Image (cartoon, rainbow, N blue to C red):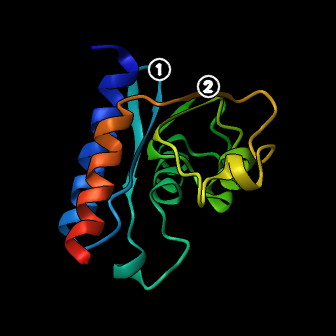
Amino acid sequence: MTTDEKYMNLALYEAQLAYEQGEIPVGCVIVADNQVIGRGHNLTQLLHDVTAHAEMQAITAATETLGGKYLQGCTLYVTVEPCIMCAGAIGWAQVSRLVYGASDPKRGYQTFAPKALHPKCIVTAGVLANECQKIIQEFFQAKR
């Protein structure tokens, strides 16, 4: 198992927590120096807040941990390609690396705002993509 797979599995755990709460199952962890400094999952239903995406929750937790608003030197792992809003936040936070699982051609930032991230941010896509896509598909199939 690679380091990216290790941390994506932690993001998948967060996605499972969201699933169990009736939230769209997206999970996120932020890592600095091989330590998780922030984690989160979708809480839009619980908080009645359309901005309460997994990435936003994890960014808030990570900046609290570090005591500053920038996440330089950090890697953000998220199970689904970030939306425009989250990509903007990832950019503003100056996250050094983004790793995501499943692509989101309908709502992902790559379709609408491919330059939203910080110019120095390195992106790795497709880590555990099948597992990340499967939990989303199961969630929506159960809703139908």
Structural crowding at the residue carrying mark 1, measured as other residues with C-alpha within 10 Å and reported as few (<14), some (14–19) or many (≥20)? few
* 19 lies left or right of 79: left
- Separation of residues labelled 1 and 2 (CA atoms): 8 Å
Marks 1 and 2: CB-CB under 8 Å? yes
Q: Residue 119 carries which label?
A: none
- Residue at the extreme top: 2
Residue hosting label 1:
33
- Whether 125 is drawn above or below 107: the answer is above
Q: Quarter of the image holding residue 83?
A: bottom right
In the rendered image, which quarter is residue 72 located in? top right
Report x, y in % for residue 118.
Answer: 77, 38
The residue singled out by tag 2 in the image is: 73
Residue 105, above or below 10: below
Please state, as top left, top right, bottom left or bottom right, where the N terminus lies in the image: top left
**Residue 4 figure quarter:** top left
Amino acid at dot 1: Asp
